[in-house]
Image (cartoon, rainbow, N blue to C red):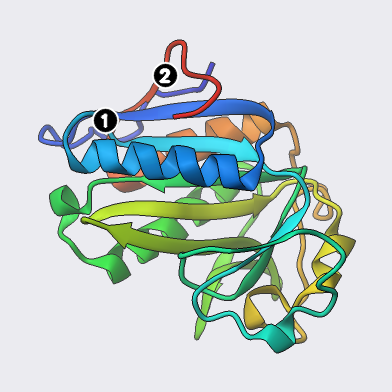
Amino acid sequence: MLNTAPKSPPQADLAPVEWVMTPGPVPYEAALAAMDARVAAIAEARAPECVWLLEHPALYTAGTSADPAELIDPKRFPVFRTGRGGRYTYHGPGQRIAYVMLDLSARGRDVRAYVRSLETWLIAALARLGVAAERRPGAVGIFVGGAKIAAIGVRVRRWVSLHGVSLNVDPDLEHFSGIVPCGLAGTKVTSLAALGAETGMAAVDAALCTAFEEVFAARAVSATGRSRAP
């Protein structure tokens, strides 16, 4: 069970955000289809906002700014083109994906501010896990000692957000060598495991949940009976 006790009072006008956790790797195309359906439901006020926590099998994704020259080993893993912003990134076991589906109409319709909030959220969650993380000027994502530990890629449709963040908990970091991660040539990647920090996914999820409530000022509630897809 997630720790959903907020450290600061949620805003009264924001409904609770549903949190869904899916065990086991979720195929990428299936995840996109489920996310698209949930975003449409949120836009039409048929479903609450949602954060979906999951893992993917090993794969590369290409954002809207992806440079083909940055795909170093195109045959190593499946490559998926996606509508999120950003360049190439890696997803795989041991990496916590959080697909964040929020109604930005209720949150100011400011995409830059939303991305900034995602960064703040990750930094706060990592602090709860004993890791001092930071932004890097001119780069999207979160870094520890110059190495990237989390990526951010978003899209907005009808003012509802899609995609979200990926946090390296204990993935095989060598898998990043098949791409130039996020277009940051010469930048190393790291993980909670490489830093000697907590790698239990339940503890990571709890840190993400509590930090989310603090940063987004909305109560997180577990989705009863919805462990497979949002």
Residue 49 screen position, x and y as percent = 29, 36
* Mark 2 → mark 1, Cα distance in angstroms: 10 Å
Residue at figure coordinates x 80%, y 46% from the top left: 170
Give the quadrant of residue 36: top left
Q: Nearer the viewer, residue 84 or 196?
A: 84
The part of the image, by quadrant, that contains residue 212 is top left
Position of residue 217 measured from the top left corner of the image (x, y, whole percent): 26, 41
User: Exactly how many numbered labels are in the figure?
Assistant: 2
Residue 81 in percent (x, y) is at: 58, 66
Tell me the SS state at disc 2.
loop
Question: What numbered label is drawn on residue 48?
Answer: 1
How packed mark 1 is, by other alpha carbons closer than 10 Å (few <14, some 14-19, many 20 or more), is some
Q: Residue at position x 43%, y 12% from top?
A: 224
* 70 lies above or below 24: below
**Res 178 visible:** yes
In percent of width and height, residue 63 lies at 54, 71
Q: Residue furthest top?
A: 225
Left or right of residue 52: residue 178 = right
Residue at position x 75%, y 49% from top? Answer: 92
Location of the C terminus by quadrant is top left
Q: Residue, x 69% and y 44% (percent of image)?
A: 56
Amino acid on which the number 1 mark rests in the picture: Pro
The residue to which callout 2 is attached is 223
- Residue 217 shows up from this direction: no
Quadrant containing the N terminus is: top right
Indicate the secondary structure of the residue bearing disc 1.
loop
**First of labels 2, 1 by sequence position:** 1
Residue at far left of view:
13
